[in-house]
Image (cartoon, rainbow, N blue to C red):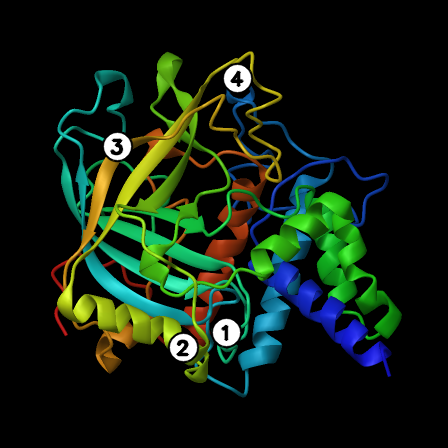
Amino acid sequence: MHSLPFHSFFLNLAVFLSSLMLLTACNAPSESLVAETTLTSNQLAPGSDIEYDAELGESLWPDEQAATLAIKESIEQTIRSRYSNNLPALRHVHSKAHGCVLADFRVNETLQDEHQRGVFQAGAHYKAWIRFSNSDSDPSREDKEGDGRGMSIKLMGIPGEKLLSDESSTQDFLMITHPVFFINDPQKYLSLIQSLSSSNLLRQLSAPLSLGIEGSIIAVKINSKKIANPLYTRYWSAVPYQLGSGSDRRAMKYSAKPCSQVDNVPNEAQFQDSNYLRTAMKQHLSTNDACFEFLIQTRDAGSVEEDKLSVEMATSEWEESVSPFFQVATITIPQQAFDKPEQRKFCENISYTPWHTVPEHRPLGGINRIRKVVYTSIANLRHDMNGVKSIEPTGNESF
């Protein structure tokens, strides 16, 4: 009798963990799980080597390239299996949107010169499309179920060079409702998804063992969060990015925090609506604006605090006592009616990736190196299956 709930708990946890697909690198595995693989330049960074910045604390993981390709192929196979006879194909994770809204991103007028890098130029003002979502891969999952939530920001009207060639003038920032991730080592992540895709029930049940104690605790914390409104909660990048370029470049993490603290504990009445988070957003924005402070914390190249401000350890939080967050911009989501069929369709065709960026905000760490391959591949596959073109918005759209 107890085997069913036990089985369900670990399978649900395992599916949740795999669906997050936000990876990194931590403890070196004892042996490789992938065969030697020849990777072409369109699968990874140019050439056979992955670009990384040792001065900012980046380092490669054993068999990282081969693990990345194996992860990509496994997720592609999952998407094809899930949606080949069930179009439209949705995102592999964050598949359920709570709302997609037009916003304003305004950089502080008083931003210090040393922090005016990339898009962070004092007084700069950008339009933004922001997508709030769940983290799970199941779009039918009820909001009353605990889950991590996502906030994906796409700034528009960003001039200059970008790291990807498939966008015009945009900059993306991706965040979730927890300051760290649940796994570091891409080999362990690969082991996790291989276990989940196995037809052997015992191997499926063993999937969470790939995480270890630390990862399992983090996963439970992420997966158990319940909120009343996506507009009232805080979000973190969890993984680092570059701030600036050249000899004065730094590593940074970022976060979005509501401008004012509001009770964000859901009540039982909300649970009657399986999509109550969308309803809550609609109710708020029907009469009021929403506001977030956009914050960053930084780490200098060659920092003596490397052990406390790790670039490669995604399960490790940058303690604010060592590197405090400070505000660089304000996000205003004006009062609006966003729940329109055409606007929903438009937002589902948008792709968010941390590699939609200017060089001054280059993604750092193993999780982001894997994302570069996996996110691009999945977005292309999804658009191909749906017969639509990827779009990069301008901010002038109307519905």
The answer to which of marks 3 and 1 sits earlier in the sequence is 1
Q: Distance between the residues labelled 1 and 4?
A: 44 Å
Q: Which label number is shown at residue 328?
A: 3
Find numbered disc 1 in the image and state the secondary structure of the residue it sits on. Answer: loop
Mark 2 touches mark 1? (CB < 8 Å) = yes
Q: Position of residue 258 (x, y in %)?
A: 30, 48
The answer to which of marks 2 and 4 sits earlier in the sequence is 4
Instruction: Work out which quarter of the rendered image holds the N terminus and state it.
Output: bottom right
The residue wearing badge 4 is: 55
The reply, left or right, for residue 102 in relation to residue 212 is left
Is residue 167 at all visible to an observer of this figure?
no
Residue at 52 percent of width and 24 percent of height: 53
Single out the mark in the foreground, 3 or 1.
Answer: 1
Q: Where is residue 203 in the image (x, y as percent from the top left)?
A: 85, 66
Name the amino acid type tagged 4: Glu
Q: How far apart are marks 2 and 4 (CA)?
A: 49 Å
Find numbered disc 2 in the image and state the secondary structure of the residue it sits on. Answer: helix
Find numbered disc 3 in the image and state the secondary structure of the residue it sits on. Answer: strand
The residue wearing badge 1 is: 144
Q: Toward which corner of the image does residue 316 lie, by quadrant?
A: top right
Q: Distance between the residues labelled 2 and 1?
A: 8 Å
The answer to which of marks 1 and 4 sits earlier in the sequence is 4
Seen in the picture, residue 268 relative to 100 is either above or below; the reply is below
The answer to which of marks 2 and 1 sits earlier in the sequence is 1
Instruction: Work out which quarter of the rendered image holds the C terminus and state it.
Output: bottom left
Single out the mark in the foreground, 4 or 3.
Answer: 3
Q: Position of residue 117 (x, y in %)?
A: 27, 26
Q: Distance between the residues labelled 3 and 2?
A: 34 Å
Single out the mark in the foreground, 1 or 4.
Answer: 1
The residue wearing badge 2 is: 270
The answer to which of marks 3 and 2 sits earlier in the sequence is 2
